[in-house]
Image (cartoon, grey):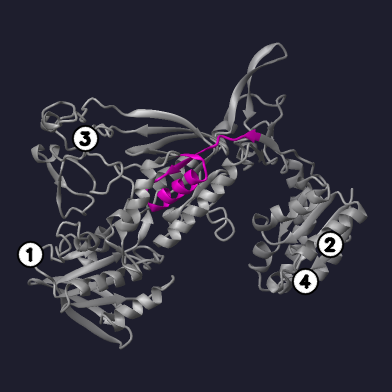
Amino acid sequence: MKIGVYVCECGSNIASTVDVEAIVEQAKEFPNVEVSRVYKYMCSDPGQEIIKKDIEEKQLDRIVVAACSPRMHEPTFRAVIEDKGLNPYVLEMVNIREQVSWVHENKKDGTEKAASLLKGAVLRSALMQPLEKKKVGVTHKALVIGGGIAGIQAALDLADMGFKTTLVEKTSSIGGKMAQMDKTFPTLDCSQCILSPKMVDVSRHPNIELLSLSEVVEVDGYVGNFKVKIKRNPRYVIEDKCTLCDDCVPVCPVIEHDEYNQGFAPRRAIYIAYPQAIPASYVIDPDACLGIDPLICAKCRDVCGPEAIDFDMQPKIIEDEFGAIILATGYETYPIEKIGEYGYGTIPDVISGLDFERIISSGGPTGGKILRPSDATVPKTVVFIHCAGSRDPSKHLPYCSKVCCMYSTKHALQYKHVVHDGTAINFYIDIRTGGKDYEEFYQRAAEEDHVIYLRGKVSELFQDGDKILIKGADTLSGETVELHADLVVLATGMIPSEGTKEMASLLNVSVGINGFIREAHPKLKPVDTAIAGVFVAGTVTGPKDIPETVSNASGAASRAAGILSQDELEIEGTVAKVEESLCRGCGLCGEACPYSAIELETVNRYGHTMQVAFVNEAMCKGCGSCAAACLNGAINQLGYTDGQILALISALGEE
């Protein structure tokens, strides 16, 4: 056996804390090491050529690379050795950047740790065996979960590439939060004007199946072959028959708060979410309607000329297969009720940014007139409070939601364009304008439209007669600030939607500390997840503005298309393997498996019928949970056997 050891300096990332020359010399004394070298950037083309040349000239059959995280560069070096005829699974990587140089300041300690890890890797590599990748077929169809702008863009991109796509939306219409917005920054384009054409394209595209009022309830299978159950809830209105004549609405006796207009307008139990809604059909709210179970009222059905209303509709379970899944379940705004110091819910003229969007919209409850909720008068002084509940790790959200500064600036501009003699005041912590033309948009508001910006934090609000008393601090002048306003608008941040949380659990994708989906790699794989074939689009991974969301969705569609365009896919060889003669069929491994990759099967052994564990290699992710749970030691994870891991541990124990 001949092992080649290659240590990377990674510029100064590793070399500043690890004496790379010293560990290269030590490695020459390790068992079976034929050659040991150091290079400044081992992942570069010259660095890769060094490895290739040694494999050819010295007939190496095992390779150890000490460099950055294998999460980043393992595919690179596997491709290098595979190019020279070696099995890709005889590569062992040692992470001496994140696990050594980035966590040590003392060079002596860093060098000793790196040497120990390197020796363990050499001993482990001597026990590594070539593994085989499996091939599976691909279902050439995509599933997009979520019908906001991210889901719409991803579905259209896939459909335009020729792939059949199912778009699942939980509510009665696609469009998401963008459909509630009046205008978009920094161009002040009408939100519906740029969104509606895409929504119509979805409804008319021959490659898109739109399932509204639907939700994914079960996902099985693996990349290229996902088996999905979708629950389609009844609309109680037959979409193809509904002509939007509106005859049903006036006769409905039930009045509810309109969610689309943030509760500022009423709607009936039979309604359409908004005029541009897709599907273009009315829907009945089963929780409000008097005509469903039991049938008390049927006035809408009685006046429906096309006979489109059907109270007997029932939920349906649709089962289908997909090659790739894109998760685009969007975001929700931070519950403003949690910010008690700002008086939302008790002071009627304190509203959220999304409330303001509906008030100022020409299609909103006031027809675009800016009126106070308390008395329907025009507010002469409006205060916009940035970071309402954001950047506050002690009580609320610890992070910045990226868009709040910009949408508050947009709201201030819109207010000034409607109420010319009004005063718009923005309380901000820091102005963040990270986007194309965003800084110019902010400067325009401050200089040309005379929007006032006060750098400081509002501490509390009080009702003072028909005004709102605002107390805060101007951190630039160091003075306390007290002023009266007619209307206060709170810029609340983004949080993961309930749908995001549900789908994360269903798809076994991991989430970060703030509840957003964790990408496979935030820089190099921003739309991939740890689950092969499952991709993410839009704000499921964190706050984004519309342009970033759209480009992100197109990226997810492109990655999904890379799978759907293939007839076969290769499955990793580092999977669990059951030694059937040792298995006693207890099922603990199946319970431990987070990917449902292990099932018990009945076999005939020595003339007796018994159950043994069977691993679906296409579903197995090589996490090792089953091997740890097995009481008989009947399961080994290929590439990480007990012997290989013990060899590594023995080297660490010598220090």
Cβ atoms under marks 2 and 4 closer than 8 Å:
no
| Residue type of the residue flagged with mark 4 | Asp
Residue at left 52%, top 42%? 162
The circle drawn on residue 50 is 2
Q: How far apart, in angstroms, are the residues tagged by discs 2 and 4? A: 21 Å
Write the residue at 9% across / 64% down: 376
Crowdedness of circle 2 by 10 Å Cα count: few (<14), some, many (20+)? some
> Circle 1 sits on which residue?
375
**Tags 4 and 1 touching, CB below 8 Å:** no
Tell me: residue 540, above or below residue 607: below
Q: Residue furthest bottom?
A: 477
Dot 1 amino acid type: Asp
| Residue extent of the magenta highlight | 136-165
Q: Which mark is residue 403?
A: none
The quadrant of the rendering that contains the C terminus is bottom right
Task: Pick whichever of labels 2 and 1 is earlier in the sequence.
Answer: 2
Are the residues at dot 3 and dot 4 in contact (C-beta closer than 8 Å)? no
Q: Position of residue 264 (x, y in %)?
A: 16, 55
Distance from Cα at disc 3 to Cα at disc 4: 70 Å
**Is residue 134 found left or right of 416 in the rendered image?**
right
